[in-house]
Each structure stands twice: as C-alpha cells, then as structure tokens.
Image (spheres, grey):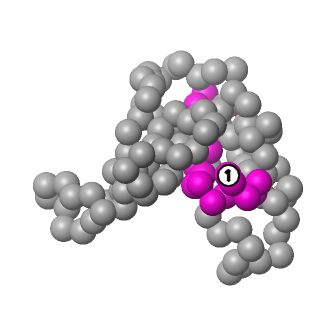
C-alpha cells in the first residue's frame, strides 16, 4: 500500500478493559514486534504515547530506539522533557467539511515513501 506517513502502534488501554491483566512488558514487546514487522515490509513505524503513559513508565522507550514518537498532550505547550517527532495538541479541532471535533497534530519531520530507517 502506497503511504507517505509512518504506521503507528497506538495502545491506550493500560490496565483496563480486555487488557486489564496484560503486563507492560507484554504490551511493549507487542509494540516492538509490530513496528519491526512494519519496518521489515518497507514502512516506517511510530509509537503513539501520552504524558501519563510516559511519566508512569508504561512505555519502555529504550525498546523503541530508531522509531518515531507521536506524543499526545492536550495543552498549550509540551511539558514532556523527552524527544518526540509529532505532537497531538488537542482533540477539539475543527476542519471544514468534517462535522465533528478532530485531533490536531504538528509533525516535526518530512517523510517520503522509501525512506525507511533500518
């Protein structure tokens, strides 16, 4: 499939619902396995995380070296001190032609098909 942005591992249900008894280690291992698979098939991978999951060590970022981070914090400025490649700054955005609120993001990278970091 011809895409021009990373494939994202977006896991947000730590300790709840059907993943209530899934360990952080398993969640991280699954994320890395997914992103490694995407990379092996020619796609750039990215991890999605919010401030709470980063501050509470739910993500083991040492396992995600070489992958971009899409950081979510709905605030006027970023308070996270680590590196990130995209910032989701609100879920209350408006776009002409869409009748509901949308997430708004700022990407700090350019990406073209075929530029997969290996």
Residue annotated with mark 1 = 54
Along the horizontal axis of the image, is 51 left or right of 26?
Answer: left
Question: Is residue 11 one of those drawn in magenta?
Answer: no
Question: Looking at this view, is 57 or 107 the one in front?
Answer: 57
Q: Above or below — where is 53 with respect to 44?
A: below
Magenta residues, start to end: 40-58
Along the horizontal axis of the image, is 85 left or right of 118?
Answer: left
* Residue pictured at 59% horizontal, 22% vertical: 116
Q: Which residue is farthest left?
A: 96
Find residue 40 and report its horizontal and vertical position in percent: 70, 30
* Residue pictured at 44% horizontal, 29% vertical: 108
* Residue pictured at 67% horizontal, 58% vertical: 53
Q: Above or below — where is 97 with respect to 9?
A: below
Question: Is residue 46 one of those drawn in magenta?
Answer: yes
**Quarter of the figure with residue 64:** top right
**Quarter of the figure with residue 94:** bottom left
Characterize the local packing of mark 1: few (<14), some (14-19) or many (20 or more) Cα atoms within 10 angstroms. Answer: some
Find residue 2 and report its horizontal and vertical position in percent: 44, 33
Find residue 32 and report its horizontal and vertical position in percent: 76, 43
Find residue 31 and report its horizontal and vertical position in percent: 73, 49
Q: Which residue is farthest bottom?
A: 17
């Amino acid at each position: 499939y011809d895409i021009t942005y990373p494939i994202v591992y977006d896991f947000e249900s730590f300790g709840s619902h059907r993943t209530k008894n899934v360990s952080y280690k398993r969640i991280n291992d699954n994320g890395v396995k997914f992103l490694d698979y995407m990379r092996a098939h020619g796609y750039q991978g990215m991890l999605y995380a919010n401030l709470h999951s980063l501050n509470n060590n739910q993500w083991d970022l040492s396992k995600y070296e070489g992958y971009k981070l899409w950081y979510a914090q709905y605030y006027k400025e970023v308070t996270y001190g680590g590196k990130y490649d995209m910032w989701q700054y609100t879920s209350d955005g408006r776009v002409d032609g869409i009748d509901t609120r949308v997430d708004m993001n700022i990407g700090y990278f350019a990406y073209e098909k075929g530029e997969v970091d290996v």
